[in-house]
């Protein structure tokens, strides 16, 4: 048995030549400024401040998957078509990455190369593939734009699948939710097949149980759920039940630990984060864990974690929970790079 990692050893663990990767973040341009200001006002007192990719180096983070958002909750606030809104967001991420001296990575080897040169890496992604709009060829167009991770759904049901937490649930007054039958649609099957043929990593975060299980059954390559938790520990719609967790792991994929907390939902504090990590490691194995913080998109954070600059707090918490040096290195980035390579990235 390898030695248990003592408290404070996580910095050694994540600098053993294995890049540290935050598998789910955003840039600072999801919404035009007036709309973003309103969103921040609504979540005042909970939402951490926006940060640029320049914080990655000081935070000890070597790479992030930075996602544009393609569902109408976001795209309707941009000028032009939903597709143009996604292109604009991706360009903003590229510009921010360049300004921070980051390298845009389209493969796992590029992340390691960037680390060797002392630069952070940014992997382009999309959260909510609504903009595909029934057109499989648009998967190829996203790939040509550099997108390498695609979340099938976000906050509204779309032509690919159905979501676990429709946007209407955010409102204090419940509205009727008109939904098609749940699960992965025939177009969702086709789009997912093309993503995996190209080497695009499929992200099932925000998918409901039916979509998650169907996507895992259809997967020809590993899939991930980039930011979630264990529903066995809290009955929160955004967390996954044991059957879903095993299904994701059964593809060879990953489940992302998520330091989210807002209005009694999510992970409460560092001890709770450790409980989720330990539960998931016991259920599906450490080789199927990663970390996704939702930087610049998350509405609230757990106690003890203030944002991306606190990323080492997460790995320190794993150390205190009894994870070994090698296990922490795997969760912090090694697992993601292995899975991305397995997908052809």
Image: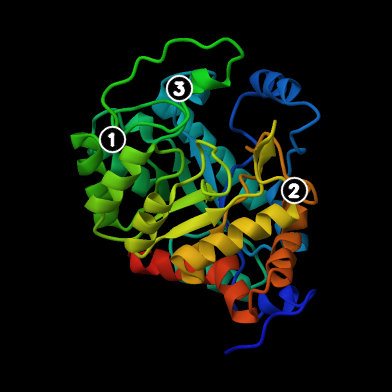
Q: First in sequence, mark 1 or 3: give its number.
A: 3
Choose between 152 and 101: the one closer to the eye. 152
Q: Are marks 3 and 2 in contact (CB under 8 Å)?
A: no
Position of 37 with respect to 163 (left or right) is: right
Task: Specify the quadrant that holds the N terminus.
Answer: bottom right
What residue does disc 3 label?
72
* Residue at 24% over, 58% down: 220
Relative to 211, residue 32 above or below: above
Residue reaching furthest to the bottom: 1
Q: CA distance from mark 1 to mark 3?
A: 20 Å
Give x and y (percent) for residue 227. 54, 48
Give x and y (percent) for residue 35. 64, 19
Q: Is residue 147 visible?
A: no
Relative to 2, residue 311 above or below: above
* Mark carried by residue 307: 2
For label 2, the crowd category at 10 Å Cα-Cα, with few meaning under 14, some 14 to 19 and many 20 or more, is many
Position of 12 with respect to 29 (left or right) is: right
Classify residue 164 by image quadrant. Answer: top left
Give x and y (percent) for residue 72. 45, 22
Secondary element under disc 2, as helix, strand or loop, is: loop
Choose between 292 and 286: the one closer to the eye. 286
Relative to 16, residue 344 above or below: above
What residue does disc 1 label?
183
For label 1, the crowd category at 10 Å Cα-Cα, with few meaning under 14, some 14 to 19 and many 20 or more, is many
* Residue at 23% over, 33% down: 135
């Amino acid at each position: 048995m390898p030695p248990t990692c003592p408290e404070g050893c996580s910095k050694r663990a994540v600098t053993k030549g294995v890049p540290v990767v935050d598998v789910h973040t955003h840039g600072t341009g999801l919404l035009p400024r007036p709309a973003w200001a309103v969103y921040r006002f609504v979540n005042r007192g909970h939402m951490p401040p926006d940060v640029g990719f320049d914080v990655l180096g000081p935070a000890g983070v070597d790479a992030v998957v930075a996602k544009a958002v393609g569902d109408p909750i976001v795209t309707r606030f941009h000028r032009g078509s939903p597709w143009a809104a996604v292109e604009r967001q991706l360009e903003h991420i590229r510009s921010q990455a360049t300004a921070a001296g980051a390298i845009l990575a389209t493969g796992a080897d590029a992340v390691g190369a960037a680390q060797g040169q002392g630069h952070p890496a940014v992997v382009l992604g999309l959260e909510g593939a609504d903009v595909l709009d029934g057109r499989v060829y648009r998967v190829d167009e996203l790939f040509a734009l550099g997108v390498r991770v695609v979340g099938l759904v976000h906050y509204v049901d779309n032509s690919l699948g159905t979501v676990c937490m429709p946007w209407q649930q955010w409102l204090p007054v419940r509205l009727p939710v008109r939904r098609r039958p749940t699960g992965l649609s025939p177009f969702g099957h086709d789009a997912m097949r093309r993503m995996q043929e190209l080497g695009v990593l499929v992200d099932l975060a925000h998918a409901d149980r039916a979509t998650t299980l169907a996507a895992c059954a259809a997967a020809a390559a590993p899939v991930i759920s980039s930011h979630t938790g264990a529903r066995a520990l809290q009955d929160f719609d955004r967390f996954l039940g044991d059957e879903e967790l095993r299904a994701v792991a059964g593809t060879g994929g990953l489940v992302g630990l998520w330091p989210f907390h807002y209005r009694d939902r999510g992970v409460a504090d560092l001890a709770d984060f450790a409980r989720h990590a330990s539960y998931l490691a016991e259920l599906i194995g450490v080789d199927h864990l990663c970390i996704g913080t939702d930087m610049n998109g998350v509405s609230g954070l757990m106690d003890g974690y203030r944002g991306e600059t606190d990323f080492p707090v997460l790995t320190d918490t794993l150390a205190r929970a009894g994870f070994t040096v090698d296990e922490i290195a795997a969760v912090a980035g090694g697992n993601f790079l292995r899975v991305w390579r397995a997908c052809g990235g």
